[in-house]
Image (cartoon, rainbow, N blue to C red):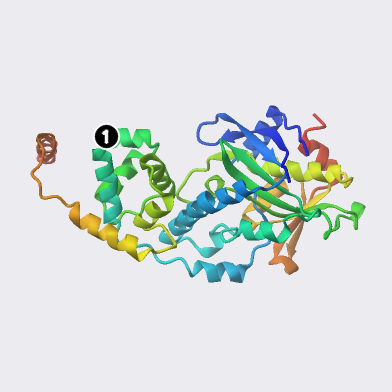
Amino acid sequence: MKIKYSEAWCLKMADLELGNEVGAGVFGLAQNVAKDAEYPTMHSSTIPFGRFVKLMRRNKRLTIEKLAEDADIDLDELIEIEDNAGHVPEPRTVYQLAQFFEVPTNNLMQVAGLSSTRDERLVNESMKFAARSDTLAPLSPEEKAALEAFVSILGRK
Amino acid sequence: MTAEVSKAYLREATTGLVKEAEVWDSIVEQHLVDWETEWKPYRDMILQAHRAAGVSLLKWPQSRHWDWRNKYQCVQGMLSTPSFAVMCSGMTEGLMLLDLSLHRCQLPEQKGKHLVYVDFLEVAPWNWKTSIGHSPRYAGVGSLLLRAAIERSLEEGFKGRVGLHALPQANSWYGKLGMIDFGPDSSKSNLHYFEMPLDKIDSFIGKDG
């Protein structure tokens, strides 16, 4: 069947609908509770996720600001992801990063500790990756300059 | 079965931009694949974010474990259970299943008459409004689907009569549309049953100006 939706009607309704949930249909409370139990508690460490994001960014020669802009994510959160192992990333951010880096959302979600499924192989590989990617290489001139500049700022009274 | 597609529009919530959309008068495999590959992972992320933030289970999205492939397979091919989908930029943004035979009106002035009952209506999880951890992508998907239910009711000769059990977080929305709230229905997990009175149908679909 063909329905004639006018643009004006659609937009009037969209503006009215903004901020409202619209779902309808019966759900089983007991079934929900049972299935909720299948969701494991968040992984305690998201170190592999932060390392992955940082290395992918560096591999693409992007600054944090540029990655945040290109992937349409919040700069503050990107900094948290790369540098705070305890940070729980927002779902949308992981989704955007998966799209940007062209990796499967499901897998990246799991590495980020946001998945209900737990693939042991992926968990093990993530930890190996985190261990191997902790480089002992000396700082590049740019890193050294940035570090010294920051130390200088930290030293200001 | 070939689905017929109607042109529609959505509002991109973050930018306010107008986006062309499509309303399909049947759920097809592509919609179910989107549900499996895009909706489910995103929904899982939202649920994990709720768990991490210690949100009470009562405030989690109530449709969080709906299985659209299973729902659709149960009614596929049945003439009395039409389905609809909304798409935008090649992605499924909303799904709906209707029932034309099992329910009757409860409003006194049309009691016992046929109506279109909205069995299930859900928007993609990235369009959920009250979930934490993200900003909704599009607004208007629910309205396009409800309009489709009313249009189907008109086509069936039911004069636009529709009824539905709203998810608790959506009670205020259906009240805002002028649907009559019959209160909690003990036979349906205490969900509120809503019905659209005849005098609100024209104003909803925009016929009275």
Label 1 element class = loop
Please indicate, yes or no, whether residue A111 appears anywhere in the rendered image: yes
Q: In which quarter of the image is the C terminus of chain B?
A: top right
Determine the residue positioned at 74% across, 68% down: B187
Q: Mark 1 lies on which chain?
A: A
**Res. B81 image quadrant:** bottom right
Q: Position of residue B205 (x, y in %)?
A: 77, 36
Q: Where is residue B13 in the image (x, y as percent from the top left)?
A: 54, 36
Q: Position of residue A93 (x, y in %)?
A: 40, 45
**Res. A98 image quadrant:** top left
Extreme-front residue of the structure: B1
Does residue B166 appear to the left or right of A114 in the view shown?
right
Please indicate, yes or no, whether residue A19 appears anywhere in the rendered image: no
The crowd level at tag 1 (other Cα within 10 Å; few <14, some 14-19, many 20+) is: some
Residue B29 versus residue B90: which sits nearer the camera?
B29
Q: According to the image, label 1 marks what residue?
A: A62
Determine the residue positioned at 51% across, 67% down: A36
Give the answer, above or below, for where B209 lies relative to B169.
above
Does residue B163 appear to the left or right of A78 in the view shown?
right
Does residue A120 appear to the left or right of B65 in the view shown?
left
Determine the residue positioned at 71% across, 53% down: B97
Type of the residue with mark 1: Leu
Q: Position of residue B166 (x, y in %)?
A: 69, 55
> How many numbered discs?
1
Give the answer, above or below, for where B182 lies relative to A68.
below
Determine the residue positioned at 69% across, 41% down: B24
